[in-house]
């Protein structure tokens, strides 16, 4: 899952936001927070 996010992050920012939200719905909050923090760093 995380590898997929990285691929989308490199490929397309809009898709990363979409997948980030999708992962949030299917995983725990800590994983989503990790993705959000990666987005803020860019």
Image (cartoon, rainbow, N blue to C red):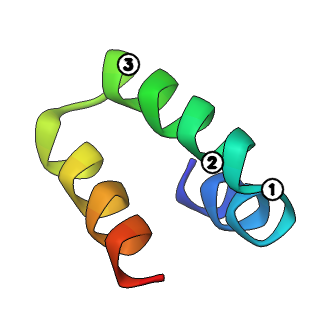
**As rendered, which of 29 and 15 lies closer to the eye?**
15
Q: In the figure, is residue 6 to the left or right of 20?
A: right
Disc 3 element: helix
- Residue lying at the far left in this picture: please name it: 30
Q: Name the spot of residue 17 as percent of width and height, x first.
A: 55, 41
- Residue lying at the far bottom in this picture: please name it: 41
Please tell me whether residue 2 is drawn above or below residue 38 in the rendered image: above
The residue sitting at 26% across, 49% down in the picture is 31
Q: In the figure, is residue 31 to the left or right of 1?
A: left
Give the quadrant of residue 25.
top left
What's the mark number on residue 26? 3
The residue sitting at 19% across, 53% down in the picture is 33
- Residue lying at the far right in this picture: please name it: 11
Q: Which is closer to the viewer, label 2 or label 3?
A: 2
Please tell me whether residue 27 is drawn above or below residue 26 in the rendered image: below
How far is the residue under mark 3 from the one under mark 1? 21 Å
**Do tag 1 and tag 2 residues touch (Cβ < 8 Å)?**
yes
Q: Residues within 10 Å of mark 2 (few under 14, many from 20)?
A: many
Give the quadrant of residue 6.
bottom right
Q: Circle 2 sits on which residue?
A: 16
Q: Circle 1 sits on which residue?
A: 12
Please tell me whether residue 30 is drawn above or below residue 2 in the rendered image: above
Q: Name the spot of residue 40 as percent of width and height, x first.
A: 33, 71
Q: Which is closer to the viewer, label 3 or label 1?
A: 1
């Amino acid at each position: 899952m995380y590898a997929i996010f990285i691929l989308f992050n490199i490929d397309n920012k809009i898709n990363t936001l979409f997948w980030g939200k999708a992962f949030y719905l299917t995983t725990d909050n800590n994983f989503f927070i990790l993705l959000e923090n990666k987005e803020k760093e860019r």
